[in-house]
Amino acid sequence: MADEAQRLPAGLRPAVLERLPAADLAQACLIGEGIATRAYQINDPSGPWVARVARDFPHPWRRRGGRSWEVPLLHALAARGLPVPRDPFAIAGAGGLPVAIVERRVAGRPPASPPHGEQHNRLARQLAEFLTGLHHLPVRDARSHAMTSAPVAADARQHLATVWDLLTEPARGWLDEEISSLEGQEVPQAVVHRDVRAEHLYLDARGDLVGVIDFGDATLDDPALDFAKIAGDFGQSFLDLLLSHYRGPAGPGVRARARRYRRLELLWEAADDAWGEGPTVIRRLESLAAAAAPTGDAGDAV
């Protein structure tokens, strides 16, 4: 039997059994964890399930108003034929906000390395189709499920204030300009995943995309956010091919905006320091600021 610290919290078990009465909760154990969530596998005669539980359980997720929108969003995306976790249901805490979201476990696994050849081309096309479908989901429908907008510029201002004393004056000035550029531009708005990267893409044995997971950061914002991490995981040629297939509302300038979002993602990593790499990230930001100094643009440095 798994160690108690690795097991599904006892306070969740009655609610899970209401929906999955034959589930083997004695063997339900931790399979992964992130900054705000722990994930547990639950074995059931109908197949494996995953319970994503607020890290502060029994307290709910509270960032961006909680995750009451997530289950309706997954149902809406599944109805459009998009590869997302199926049959999700939420378990609410005392205040009504979800403390856990339970869904069927997606088959397959994340790619161990960037794909090549035909698999490279196929995955770029399939991911473009997914993002096109996601970004075309009506914003009004998402708002009706309590999804809100979380502007990157506002978050970035807070993160810059957090790490201000750790930065040199040139880096402060460069980051202020990066954020000001975001504040001064009008961008399309769509439902965005906001954390599209290799570990959240599940492929089958043929290399086909069968699932996109972890919608905890989803919000209403610029579609370019969903391209920010792709080049880092799969290479620039993959991103270029993906964008050639994409038919969503990202609009002109998507590559430049995606690069800027990736640079500002480093600011979030430095401010949060969830993985203990804050000093390393600060050095990367300083390097980007130095590279941008002659022209005022860090270009493709990320």
Image (spheres, helix red, strand yellow):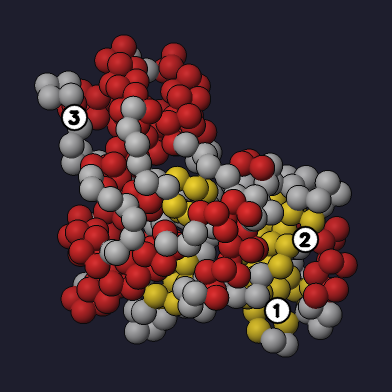
The residue under label 1 is: 43
Give whichever of 292, 240 is nearer the camera: 240
Q: Nearer the viewer, mark 1 or mark 3?
A: 3
Q: CA distance from mark 1 to mark 2?
A: 18 Å
Q: Tags 1 and 3 in contact by the CB under 8 Å rule? A: no
Q: How many residues crowd mark 1 within 10 Å: few (<14), some (14–19), many (20+)?
A: many
The residue under label 2 is: 91
Residue for point 82% across, 61% down:
12
Q: How many residues crowd mark 3 within 10 Å: few (<14), some (14–19), many (20+)?
A: some
Percent position of residue 28, x then y: 73, 70
Percent position of residue 220, x then y: 49, 48
The residue under label 3 is: 297
Percent position of residue 88, x then y: 66, 70
Percent position of residue 24, x then y: 78, 78
Q: How many residues crowd mark 2 within 10 Å: few (<14), some (14–19), many (20+)?
A: some
Q: CA distance from mark 1 to mark 3?
A: 51 Å
Q: Above or below — where is 168 with respect to 227?
A: above
For label 2, the SS is strand
Amino acid type, residue under disc 1 in the picture: Asn
Q: Above or below — where is 8 with respect to 298?
A: below
Give whichever of 83, 290 is nearer the camera: 83
Residue for point 50% across, 25% down:
158
